[in-house]
Image (spheres, helix red, strand yellow):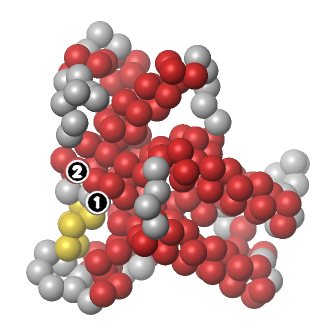
Amino acid sequence: MDAERYKSYDELWKDDSKKQEEIEQTFNHWRNETIAILTYRKLLENENFIINDELLLQAVLDYYSALDETKKSHNIVFPNESKKWGYGMYWYVQRKPIQLLGLGNQESLNVNEEVAAIIVVLKPLNKLLGIGFQAALSDEKRKLIKDLINEVELTFTYRTCTAKSMALMIQGMYTGLSLTLPAKDKDD
């Protein structure tokens, strides 16, 4: 951690119990999402993966620190969703909270990037189309989503990204998805 950029995390939010609660909720949410994806992909049983809670907490703290810094420097109160997801997944990928114990195959080396890509693509789709949306999609649309997840994963893995560039990429992706896929009925 860059000591000049960050104060001690304890000092940043020591008097803000609401922020501490938000950090705890975010940590639990990210952990649960990670477990759900790893379980769905059968990676927790097939490989020797663990979720390193210290690294996950570090990612959450870095996320809040960077987001607070951006809010202060740009004088904004509520950053948009793509900025939040961009910053969050940037720090998730940087800290790599999913650890592989022992030897794994090449695909297992990018598991943090894969999980971040799945979260970034599926979360807004669940919000836009409703949970369980995939059952109603054509095979062509499902392939589009799978290809998008693969592209996002490759970007997270092989491109030099910043939190800001991830936020811009996610904003463009969200806009494209909202224009391409039918929105769920408002009565649902």
- Give me the residue at 49% from left, 74% from top: 154
Q: In which quarter of the image is residue 66?
A: top left
Using the image as rendered, state which of residue 187 and residue 92 is in the foreground: 92
Position of residue 143 in the picture relative to residue 107 (left or right): right
The residue shown at (63%, 74%) is 148
| Residue pointed to by mark 2 | 55
The picture places residue 24, in percent across and down from the top left corner, at 34, 34
Q: Report the Cα–Cα distance between label 1 and label 2.
A: 7 Å
Pointer 1: what residue? 96
Q: Position of residue 53 (x, y in %)?
A: 21, 50
Residue 155, relative to residue 178: is it above or below? below
Please report whichever mark, 1 or 2, sits nearer to the chain's N-terminal start. 2
Q: Which amino acid type is shown beneath numbered disc 2?
A: Leu
Q: Is residue 81 above or below residue 146?
A: above
Question: Where's residue 127, x and y in %?
Answer: 69, 52
Query: Please, is residue 172 above or below residue 69 in the view?
Result: below
Q: Please tell me which residue is depicted at 48% across the width and 46% down the height of the picture.
A: 163
Left or right: where 174 falls relative to 59 = right
> Relative to 97, is 152 above or below?
below
Residue 130 in sight here: no
Residue 29 visible in the current orientation: yes
Front residue of 80 and 25: 80
Label 1 environment density (alpha carbons within 10 Å; few <14, some 14–19, many ≥20): some
Q: Are marks 1 and 2 in contact (CB under 8 Å)?
A: yes
Please tell me whether mark 1 sits on a helix, a strand or a loop: loop
Q: In this view, does 83 lie to the left or right of 10?
A: right
User: In the figure, residue 32 lies in which quadrant?
Assistant: bottom left
